[in-house]
């Protein structure tokens, strides 16, 4: 809910005023800008990170003022941004700057600072009107030359001006802001976005925006819903194929978005685990466009998704651990549906391949929201899944729900018996662990007895260690 833009909408730390007062006394005019102003108007919880633009003061003089409050670091040689860190907050303090497009990508700009600019002129190069508002600190005055508050109240994301089209990164920012704040995107802004070339952007910068869409949106589907109209889908062909595919049980894109929103609603605040779950939801039907017309079973669908999922994830990011975590969840989640068939050994081995709580969480999201699996309602989201409950009980009884099984027979036991390290020791340890996973070894005493019997059959191992 948007608040009225009076001074009560902008609660501030006392320190912010002290910093502003010092800047004012040195001849500058401090104005809080960007996301802090926007989020204040939306009534969102406040961070202690402040973006401040200072007018009328050269960077060197500004640096001198800020150093009275704590260490100051320059961010980028030519951008005139100073980062001040205190016990109470962090400040990104900048001097207004002029930019000219001289090359490709979001870094292809010539930049020069100009403390004599007006706020209206300086804010004209910002991306969206809701990010081009300011709060003049010492005057306690809301500044909105581009009508951002009006757009925010209308739940509309609109670009500020002609400079918007100079940075293709803003296309993905439009996607994530629409998702995060539940906004529609102005038709004229969509048109400019469709004209941009995202190939200019490094993968790392694209991933920053996509990650925000996934982690910060109440309904990521709302942001992804603009992917076609913003011209984003051609850059992610795996998503484009899913978007275009009409499966036998309905549109796979809509089904995927429903599951994605269910997973987003169940985020737990662990970024790595939440991202893995969200990306698993996004990828789980990517194989459907290449499959026969009949609705595939969960395992067949997971198998078909493996290749396009890896391709899409590698377009998103080079975080190999995250990619492997998602591919593992895609492989293992269908096994949850076979919980009643799994032996003790199956469950123990599954616990070695994947974190079982995460596999259960993924299965409940993927199949609890799937109307064709187990008779669950289409909008069940991450609903309780009978098969997940069965596997959870089974794993807990075996002691492997939270942690995978650890080998009971260790190398030190073999060395104490007279065996030297080498390939043969590794083979014996592996064989002992397989026996343990099958339930033939359940204690250290049984492991030692198994070792004695094995070495008795192969006494040469104690002589050569090879």
Image (spheres, helix red, strand yellow):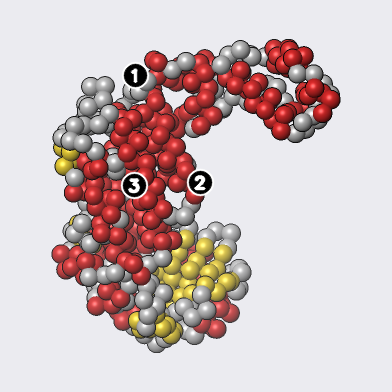
Crowd class of label 1 (few under 14; some 14 to 19; many from 20; radius 10 Å):
some
The answer for how far apart the CA atoms under marks 3 and 1 are is 30 Å
Crowd class of label 2 (few under 14; some 14 to 19; many from 20; radius 10 Å):
few
Give the SS element for disc 1.
Answer: helix
Q: In this view, does 461 lie to the left or right of 127?
A: right
Q: Name the residue under label 3.
A: 308
Image position of 296 with respect to 21: above or below: above
Image position of 374 with respect to 263: above or below: above
Which sits in the foreground, 69 or 323? Answer: 323
Residue 431 at x, y = what percent?
64, 22
Q: Is residue 342 left or right of residue 60?
A: left
Tell me which residue sits at (53%, 22%) in the image: 348
Q: Name the residue under label 1.
A: 386
Tell me which residue sits at (47%, 84%) in the image: 57
Residue 161 at x, y = what percent?
24, 75
Tell me which residue sits at (34%, 67%) in the image: 199
Image position of 211 with respect to 334: above or below: below
- Which numbered mark, 1 or 2, is in the foreground of this view? 2
Q: Residue 321 carries which label?
A: 2
Residue 150 sits in quarter: bottom left
Q: Residue 48 carries which label?
A: none
Q: Is residue 25 visible?
A: no
Q: In which quarter of the image is the C terminus?
A: top right
Which sits in the foreground, 329 or 381? Answer: 329
Residue 41 at x, y = what percent?
31, 58
- Which numbered mark, 3 or 1, is in the foreground of this view? 3
């Amino acid at each position: 809910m948007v608040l009225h833009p009076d001074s009560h909408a902008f609660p501030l730390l006392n320190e912010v005023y002290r910093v502003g007062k010092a800047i004012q006394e040195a001849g500058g005019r401090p104005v809080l800008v960007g996301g802090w102003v926007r989020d204040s108007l939306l009534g969102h919880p406040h961070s202690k990170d402040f973006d401040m633009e200072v007018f009328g003061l050269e960077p060197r003089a500004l640096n001198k003022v800020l150093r009275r409050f704590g260490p100051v670091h320059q961010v980028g040689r030519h951008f005139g941004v100073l980062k001040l860190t205190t016990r109470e907050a962090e400040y990104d303090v900048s001097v207004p700057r002029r930019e000219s497009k001289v090359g490709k990508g979001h870094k292809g700009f010539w930049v020069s600072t100009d403390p004599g600019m007006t706020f209206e002129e300086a804010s004209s190069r910002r991306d969206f009107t809701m990010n081009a508002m300011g709060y003049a600190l010492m005057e306690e005055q809301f500044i909105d030359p581009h009508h951002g508050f009006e757009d925010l109240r209308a739940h509309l994301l609109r670009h500020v001006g002609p400079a918007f089209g100079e940075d293709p990164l803003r296309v993905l920012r439009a996607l994530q802001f629409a998702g995060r704040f539940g906004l529609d995107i102005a038709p004229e802004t969509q048109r400019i976005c469709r004209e941009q070339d995202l190939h200019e952007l490094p993968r790392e910068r694209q991933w920053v925006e996509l990650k925000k869409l996934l982690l910060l949106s109440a309904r990521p589907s709302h942001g992804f819903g603009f992917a076609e109209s913003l011209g984003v889908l051609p850059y992610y062909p795996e998503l484009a194929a899913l978007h275009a595919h009409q499966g036998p049980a309905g549109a796979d894109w809509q089904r995927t978005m429903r599951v994605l929103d269910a997973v987003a609603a169940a985020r737990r605040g662990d970024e790595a685990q939440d991202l893995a779950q969200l990306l698993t939801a996004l990828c789980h039907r990517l194989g459907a466009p290449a499959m026969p017309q009949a609705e595939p079973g969960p395992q067949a669908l997971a198998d078909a998704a493996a290749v396009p999922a890896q391709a899409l994830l590698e377009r998103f990011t080079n975080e190999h651990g995250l990619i492997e975590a998602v591919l593992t969840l895609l492989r293992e989640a269908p096994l949850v549906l076979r919980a009643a068939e799994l032996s003790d050994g199956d469950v123990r081995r599954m616990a070695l391949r994947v974190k079982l709580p995460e596999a259960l969480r993924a299965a409940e999201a993927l199949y609890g929201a799937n109307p064709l699996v187990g008779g669950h309602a289409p909008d069940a989201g991450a609903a309780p899944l009978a098969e997940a409950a069965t596997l959870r009980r089974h794993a807990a009884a075996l002691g492997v729900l939270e942690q995978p099984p650890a080998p009971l027979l260790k190398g030190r036991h073999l060395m104490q018996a007279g065996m030297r390290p080498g390939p043969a020791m590794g083979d014996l340890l592996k064989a002992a662990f397989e026996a343990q996973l099958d339930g033939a070894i359940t204690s250290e005493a049984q492991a030692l007895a198994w070792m004695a019997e094995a070495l008795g059959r192969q006494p040469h191992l104690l002589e050569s260690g090879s």
